[in-house]
Amino acid sequence: MLALAGSTTFLCSRFMATPFSLSSLAALTFSIFVLFNIIWLVFLKPYYFSPLLKLPQEPRNLKHFIKPHNSNEILELMDTVPNNGFIRFLDMFNSEIVTITDPKLVAEFLGTKADHFTKRPKLKKILESILGNGLVVAEGKDHKYQRKHLLPVFNFKVIKNLYPLFWGKATEMTTLIKQEIQSSSPEKNSSAIIDIDDWAGRVSLDIISKAGFGSDFHALSHPETDLNTSYRAAFLPNANSRLAFILSLLTHPTLINSLPTANARTLREAVGAVTNWIRNFIAERQSDMPKEKDTKAVHQDIISAAMENGAFSVENLVDQSKTLLGAGHETSATAVTWGIYLLSQPRYSHIQQRLRSEIRENLPSPTSGVEVTESILDKLPYLEAVSKEILRVYAPVPVLGRIAQSPVEIGGTVFPKGTVIQIHMWAINKSKKLWGEDAREFNPERWLTDKVNGGAKDSLAFLSFGYGSRSCIGRGFALAENKALLAQLIGSFDIKPPHGETEDLNISWGITARMVGGLPLKTTIVEGW
């Protein structure tokens, strides 16, 4: 390519009347080199010279030249494009991406061949600027080390002790929602429009702060404290941060983050404020920690348990703390929001009613003061089925993308170094080929007849928690929290859309899939529990 640019420059200099200076020739050569690279990468290679042209692929569609595919569009491809486990498509600026559709190939990609892939460098840089080099961001040996030493912190014994916390925070949330309803309409069985997305975010933040650090952020009762405001600015996406995210992928993350704009400055200050709080927390915990290690201690918070095992430096503990806050809160809140959205739809009102009946028949009233443990909450089969089905239909993290660091063979196909491969969990979870004709329907019954696979043809057809060494380490935590919050919300309220069935959803596709504009629903207190 450089030789071609040089040859073109030479010919231009020979045949143009005005002689070129050496600096002008250099500038012209560079400009032509850049132009040829753009033509090659954007127009020639993806259409005529890619080694992956023989893969099944999406019909040519120029709308994605300036707009990336979302997981709903990938779901349509999976159900309409005949394929052998791979589908090739062209994304923004004709960048080539391969998505895997076969669970067996997913197992190979995320299992035996996982070490051949990493995050895309720009995405890693963006995540690292906010989360640090914690478990979500780390790669290779560093990731294996971190995961090995964090797994004991998330074992069943630890999670079991957190069930009363989940239930207690759910009780606080429903109590405050009732107060909001009653203040707006004091009649019995009164109702009001409540933004469930806002409450889900606040309660999830309180839970992760208490479970992770033993320190309550009080986002439910005092959402506008400096710490809560900083957290939202640092970790929760808005229109400006989504734009910055796209620009970072197209240019360079450091450039975007260092711009002297109000949004960039707010983000830097917010991340700094949260980081300082974490550093102070770790310093306090270290000063309180006994010099002799207590192997029988059962810690009440996750980060203290991670500190106790002595495997992490202070800097890495800071990174793990930011990861716990960012990843643990956002995904949990998103799952609750999607769950209430589904249960609120009129076509699923029978599911909401059946779930409320099971909850009220088997769980103590939130006002009773009775502590709810795993031995109680985990014994409700319909609640379990509903929770799993919510996570199947709306996977909070819709897609996982990796880039090949060397040539690698998967399922008999060789992918060159630099190939970007994606797993769209959102799409695989709803593939008709894997789940049958009702794949896109919200149907908890499937988990009652098949508690393990939900009736799917493969255990990896349910990918909401990932697979292999990159699977979600907090799966047990997330399921328990989700069940506690759903139980209290559905047990306490009848929830409906304010204007009938919700048809068109405006989804923000980022690290998580979130509703734009929150989730305002008509929420009515149901007496008698």
Image (spheres, rainbow, N blue to C red):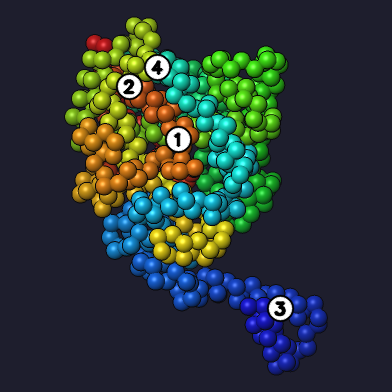
Residue 324, placed above or below residue 436: above
Is disc 4 placed on a helix, strand or loop? Answer: helix
Question: Distance from label 2 to label 4 (Cα)?
Answer: 13 Å
Category of crowding for the residue at label 1, using alpha-carbon neighbours closer than 10 angstroms: few (below 14), some (14–19), many (at least 20): many
Choose mark 2 or mark 4, whichever is in front.
Answer: 2
Amino acid identity at mark 3: Leu
Question: Distance from label 4 to label 1 (Cα)?
Answer: 18 Å
The residue to which callout 3 is attached is 28
Return the x and y of residue 78 as percentages of the image width and height.
32, 57
Choose mark 4 or mark 3, whichever is in front.
Answer: 4
The residue to which callout 4 is attached is 167
Question: Distance from label 4 to label 3 (Cα)?
Answer: 68 Å
Residue sitting nearer the eye, 159 or 517: 159
Amino acid identity at mark 4: Trp
Answer yes or no: do the residues labelled 4 and 3 have beta carbons within 8 Å? Answer: no
The disc, 2 or 1, on the residue closer to the chain's N-terminal end is 1
The residue to which callout 2 is attached is 378
